[in-house]
Amino acid sequence: MKRRAFLGLTGATLAVTAAAAGAFAGWTLSDNGAQPLLLSARNDAAGKHFAVGYRLDGSQAFATQVSERCHDVVPHPCLPLALFVGRRPSPQSYLIDTRDGRLLQTLHTPAQRHFFGHAVFHKDGEWLYTTENDTSDPGRGVIGVYRLQALQLQRTGELSSHGLGPHQLLWLADGETLVVANGGIRTEADSRVEMNLDTMESSLVLLQRDGTLLSKEQLPERKNSVRHLAVASDGTVVSGQQYMGDPGDAAPLLAIKRPGQAFQPFPLAEAQRLEMNQYTASLAINNELRLLALTAPRGNRVFIWDLDSAELRLDAALPDCAGVGAVPEGFVVSAGIGRCRHYDCRGERILTQPLQLPAGLWDNHLRLT
Amino acid sequence: MIRSPLTLALLSLALAACSPADPQQGVSSALANGVLLPAYGSWSEANSQLASSGRAFCADQQTLSEARQAFLTAQSAWASLQPLLIGPLAEGNRAWQVQFWPDKKNLVARQVEALLKNKPKLTPADLDKSSVVVQGLTAYEYLMYDSAIDLGNAEQKARYCPLLVAIGQHQQALAADVLDRWQAEDGMAAQLHGFPNERYAEPAEAVAELLRTQVNAIDGLKKKLGTPLGRQSKGQPQPYQAEAWRSKASLANLAAGLASAERIWRGAEQDGVQALLSADQSPLQQRIDAAYSDTRQRLAALQRPLGELLADPAGRSELNALYDSLNALHRLHETELAKALGIQMGFNSHDGD
């Protein structure tokens, strides 16, 4: 893995840079063995919220009850901890020890800010960036900047997202440039209600860690909200949209920005676009196989395409499909109802198998570490 | 990306032990054989009849009244499928090809006229390439019943017949294709019998989808009644927003949909979803039985078409009582039955994130 190489890790011993030493004092990297750990927010049948970690064989690493529902999970690049990010409009996120599920910190946004559900750790492991709402100017996009010190995240400042209602953000391949999906929708504190459907302004923004804007691009349809992202190892960015206009409109629900090229619609066949019901959820890219996977929970479909040729590889039913993540064989997909699935994409025909993880109630995103 | 090899513990071995004694598998199997397959078979048969009726009518070998009857049979078969809309017909944009509803802007009339203006000698191949708005029963109904069209007039009949024949053919082909997808070796029916399969990891997933589809359809029946009643428009009746208003079959369609929903509950031989309730849940079973009975009787008691009932206060009051009854039936399923069976109705799909 890149991050191991970066930190010069060997086995379970952690060697850290001087800058990060304070943050990591007293910690050793846990050896996960062969089984990746799947991290996700999940509910129980009674509606209580949990931050969970499971091995793909179904064994539970932890399930920690948290007070608010979470959305994405951000694993730390080298320490066994992860931030479970509050689902909008939550002002809370939870820093969890992924070895035993211990809650290390409940992270609060400052006044007049709430989380939008996504964040990223910088590859050095010292800095965290989140998407947030400035509720004093509802919808104004903010990138919260936090520093990890002594296993606690401290807010040190914020950047502009250069747009409205930022949702997911990720790193480009250099690990230094942020790509931000500004969904374009204004919402107020404690609210999920859209305030500006007629004046939406969604964009895909690239910016440096110091906040310098590198580019800002838009899709032509005003009501097409850029929400979720995946970035390939060559820097190709794919975005998934949620279209807020008429159900009959033909808006591009997937878009792509190949390195050095403009942000443009991904060549999506009409049959698949229609199946999505104007709504895409999570995206993932398998770099070895150069495949793109997408969940469309309103259409109850999972799709896989060849990232380079845009050839459709899979269009399968999976009710209320949710998170998706890459594994060496292909992808793992979770679902709000029913069992999680494993898609083996190495052969000509994609093989689908259910996983022995608890069925249903998985939230929108999953991460594999 | 994880590079390390991953050993998956898959469910297949554990599930291979599932015997037919598994109650969920029993219900899924019984509903596939006893309710779903027969309904899809009837629908396909009704569409064959529709296609031949269209051809016969246009060759002056059938009366308009006979042609309308063939249409009503096909429309009723389609209405019966609403609570059974899982698998192929629910996917790939196929359902839109059968019916275009709601049609708030009267697109059916506009697009039919535009299509025939552009292609006076319309062929079935032309129709296959056209919008779903003109491919289905809603357009057929427009041709058969709209007051602006007089199929007794030879000139008009000649104008509209190519479309009539093409729609019949399109529906017949669509229904035959869907039925094939149900009956194929690894088709939809097989996926409701043997687990795990490409679609379902275990019988519980199949039963959950059957129930969700049925409950969504009951909700759909509420919309089909509530929309013309003006429940979404400040109480102002909207008779032209009703499903099948031209053929005055709105209430007949509701009854067909309700009957199918009840068949998912009861099964062909008392082996439907109700069979999953335990003895100590029999009070709930009785309440659901009673709710079906109440809705069914209220619907059967309506003596006039929907349009007429909407036009006077007494009629609207009967319709509102029917709506409340449907609503009670819907809630019993959505909350109490789903909870009793441990079935999740939805989680992320309306999340908006």
Image (tube, coloured by chain):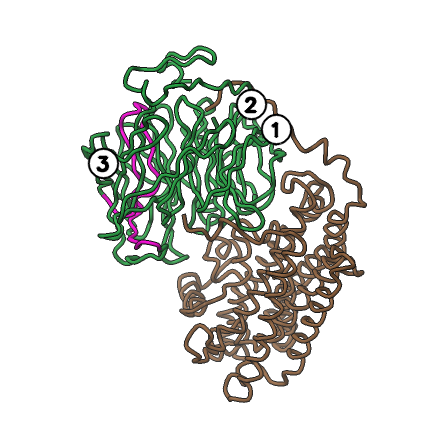
In the image, is residue B160 part of the stretch drawn in magenta?
A: no
| Amino acid, disc 3 | Gly
Return the residue found at the far left.
Answer: A212
- Mark 3: secondary structure: strand
Residue B292, quarter of picture:
bottom right
Residue behind mark 3: A157
Other residues around mark 2 within 10 Å, as few (<14) / some (14–19) / many (≥20): some
Question: Tag 2, which chain?
Answer: A
Give coordinates of residue B130: x percent, y percent. 46, 56
Residue B290, quarter of picture:
bottom right
User: In brown, which chain?
Assistant: B
Residue behind mark 1: A57
The quarter in which the N terminus of chain A is drawn is top left
**Distance CA(mark 2)–CA(mark 3):** 37 Å
Residue behind mark 2: A35
Closer to viewer: mark 1 or mark 3: 3
